Image (cartoon, rainbow, N blue to C red):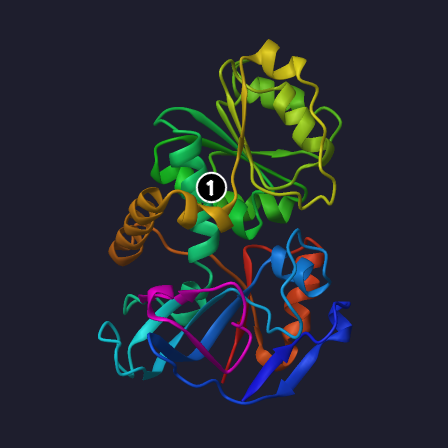
Amino acid sequence: MKAVLVENYDSIDGISIREIETPGVSSGNVRVKVGAAAVGFVDGLKVQGLYQTRDPLPFIPGTEFAGIVDAVAGDVTAFRPGTPVIGMVRSGALAEYISVPSAALKPLPPQVPFEAGASFQANYLTGLYALDARAALQAGEILLVLGAAGGVGIAAVQLGKLMGARVIAAASTAEKRDFAVRFGADQTIDYTKADWRDTLKELTGGHGPDVIFDPVGGEVALQAFRSIAWRGRHLVVGFASGTIPALAFNLPLLKGGALLGVDLAQIQRREPETHARLITQLFDWLASGKLQPVVGKVVPFADFREAFKTMQSRSALGKMIVTFG
């Protein structure tokens, strides 16, 4: 089979598609013929060895995928060949086939295409864990989403609206702000402008955001916290700006505010009951059509580098998707 293979931590141009052996199906595992795989910001960091944890070399990047069950181990009863599925793993999705434990898969609702399925799990689970389990977002509260047009940002916009919040989307271009409005944002802010906090104060009537969803970090994160409402909650989701901010401790004191960390990689291990509850909620919304995953730019497998480079340039609207066949 063909797969993107990272043999050395390198630039995007330094990795390529290789012909490797198709994986077998060991006990408890299911082999999936991949229809679509997602490329997120973290995937680009992992390829270059810049993420906080390193995958052992060589490895196939990609954590999210959707496809058709190709083969199952004899002890697997939950899936059968021909079943459409969604999967999320540590790595391995950017390949024609992937073999994973059956617990890593969920049935793909029939009305959901592969591209949307591959866009779904990581971003929306991160968003719901942050807004529900960490910030306890309430209907009627004001939610500010930084980096609102990115994959996890647009998921937070949609989820915030489903939860009854008033959503203000912050993004750097008119195209990105229009994109956020299309998927539910009530109002938008250009956080590249020097006076953007004045605009935020005006939009919130001086109240400030009750919850800040922040996958950006950097200076914009510090300025956002300075505008937070009394007893507001600032969700630390990531650092797409490339800079980890340092917050003076007197600010949470003066604001009565809280910094809340959000790490998707640890949820299932540390909070299994919460993880199961949120997954059930998300898939109920997906099956009912209440939640429709945003699909960003779609590129064919042969052009996989384009997906990585678009993410690196921070020009992506939604999550980048690579399709197979």
The mark total stands at 1
Residue at the spot 50% in from the left edge and 83% down from the top edge: 96
Task: Decide which of 45, 189 is in the foreground and name it.
Answer: 45
Taking 31 as reference, is 129 above or below it?
Answer: above
Task: Decide which of 38, 88 is in the foreground and name it.
Answer: 88
Residue at the spot 58% in from the left edge and 55% down from the top edge: 317
Q: What element carries label 1?
A: helix
Residue receiving disc 1: 157
Looking at the image, residue 177 sits to the left or right of residue 78; the answer is right
Expressed as whole percent of the image width and height from the top left, the position of residue 66 reads 42, 71
Expressed as whole percent of the image width and height from the top left, the position of residue 246 reads 72, 28
Picture quarter with the N terminus: bottom right
Expressed as whole percent of the image width and height from the top left, the position of residue 316 reads 62, 56
Expressed as whole percent of the image width and height from the top left, the position of residue 26 reads 38, 81
Rendering quarter of residue 45? bottom right
**Residue 271 lies within the magenta run:** no
* Residue 167 visible: yes
* Residue 184 visible: no
Taking 207 as reference, is 90 above or below it?
Answer: below
Residue at the spot 58% in from the left edge and 59% down from the top edge: 40
Q: What span is in magenta?
A: 87-107
